[in-house]
Image (cartoon, helix red, strand yellow):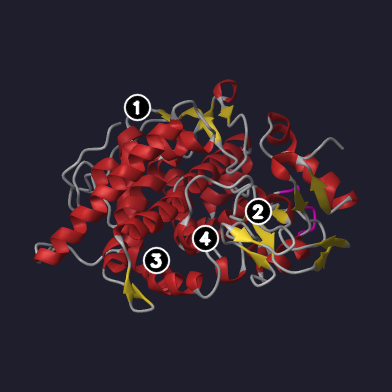
Amino acid sequence: MAQFDHHTEHFAQRWRETYAELRGGCPVAHTDAHGGFSVVTRYEDVRRVLHDPKTFACGRELEFSNAPGERTGGVTVPVNPVRMGMMEMDPPDSQAYRRLLAPYFSPKAIKDYRPRLAEIVSWMVDRVIGSGRIDFVDDLSNPLPALVSLDYFGLPLERWEAYASALHKAAYREKGSARAVGEVLADLRATVAHRRALVARGDSEQPETVLDRLLGAEVNGVPLTDELVTEMMFMLLNGGIDTSTALIASMFGYLGAHPERRAELAADQSLVPTAVDEMLRYFTPGTGVARTVTAPVELGGVSLRPGDRVLLALGSANNDPDVFPEPDEIRLDRDNNSKHLAFGSGIHRCLGAFLAPAEMTVLLEEVLRRMPDFAIDESKVIRYPTIPLVNGYIAMPASFTPGPTVLTGFDARLPVRAATPATELVS
């Protein structure tokens, strides 16, 4: 096959076929693209790497004795310009930072948040329910994860549109998106500094948020700097927004094309959580995650040496027929779909592994109740032209029978959970 490159339009159009060919013929295949790396496509190999952080590192700026002066690393190929918090750290540092945040993302914490989540979802649907028209990307799958993320993390809610737009467009490399992401980072820095000043003065009356937790935390006896808190918040936003955006759009795209499956879920909503797991398996939103080899190792019959880079093809692993029988078929009652690797596995498993499915479950239940007859205009659906990081959609317009609002009282124009910093975000 041609040289593997997950940044090309060809890969975006044929990623399932590309992965199937590699799994069957060369499951750990080397490519010279982007400085050279190996793509790992079989489930067991991918999972092995994820559970061996000593041999396969996440950190950036790594240097090895066999290549003195050369630095490599990070969890993307090529490396992102901005470090992604503990995602791009190795033990013990990664685990020290993870322990700060883990209680906020536990099953119990997400269960406690669910009434608020339902309120936000109802508000989002209220915005379009009377019109009979919706774009599942612009009106639901893009704004909802941004709004939930800002609300849950303790960031100003009135910024949700600017944050959603910037991170969504960056995922598919729209021209000018790098500038917009830079503005988000600048706004985060201002928010962090402002929030720290409020807490220091004792002027805050809101409950402690994820942001507050980081501002008050220490690692190895050293308080987190504003810059590190900003980095961690940016990591959370990147992990929580466009991956969910992509999955939500894929989910509704599938149900729009398969009304019989939609009717099945509407008739028995107890199937929804299992269906969401199956959608995560089948439509794995994250294209892959990278690691750097730290010691000589053999993987899938291929010898790797320190400094070698590997890309773990999560979408391929989740469609491996050795683990998921008939993987190209979506089974709403598949009994082993919880084994999927959409959130990774091991010590770096995504913190949002409980929040994201809850978000998608509540949303799907709401849409099935309030706009069950939606019809997608397939002629106007636009996919991402390339999917180097996330596999999603730019547009997915649909129509449905209009309905009444439920008026939850939620108002995303107000900073409900967090104070507003002095600087304004340029949209």
> Circle 2 is placed at which residue position?
70
Spot occupied by residue 5 in the image (x, y as percentages of width and height): 73, 38
User: Which mark lies nearer to you, 1 or 3?
Assistant: 3
Mark 3, secondary structure of its residue: helix
Pointer 1: residues within 10 angstroms few (<14), some, or many (20+)?
A: some
Determine whether, in the image, residue 140 is placed left or right of residue 288: left
Q: Quadrant of residue 290?
A: bottom right
Callout 2: helix, strand or loop?
loop
Q: Quadrant of residue 159?
A: top left
**Is 75 or 9 nearer to us in this picture?**
75
Looking at this rendering, what residue extends furthest in the front direction? 69
Mark 1 — residue? Answer: 131
Secondary structure under tag 1 reads loop
Could you tell which of marks 3 and 4 lies nearer the N-terminus? 4
Horizontal side, residue 235 vs residue 230: left or right: right
Q: Which residue is mark 4?
A: 87
The residue labelled by disc 3 is 110
Q: Indicate which disc, 4 or 2, sits on the residue closer to the N terminus.
A: 2
The quadrant of the picture occupied by the C terminus is top left
- Which amino acid, by three-letter code, is at mark 2? Glu
Give the mark toward the camera: 4 or 2. 2
Task: Give the Cα separation between the discs numbered 2 and 3.
Answer: 43 Å
Q: Earlier in the sequence, mark 2 or mark 3?
A: 2
Spatial CA distance of label 1 from label 3 is 32 Å
State yes or no: residue 39 in magenta: no
Q: In this orientation, does residue 136 appear?
A: no
Q: Which residues are magenta?
A: 323-329
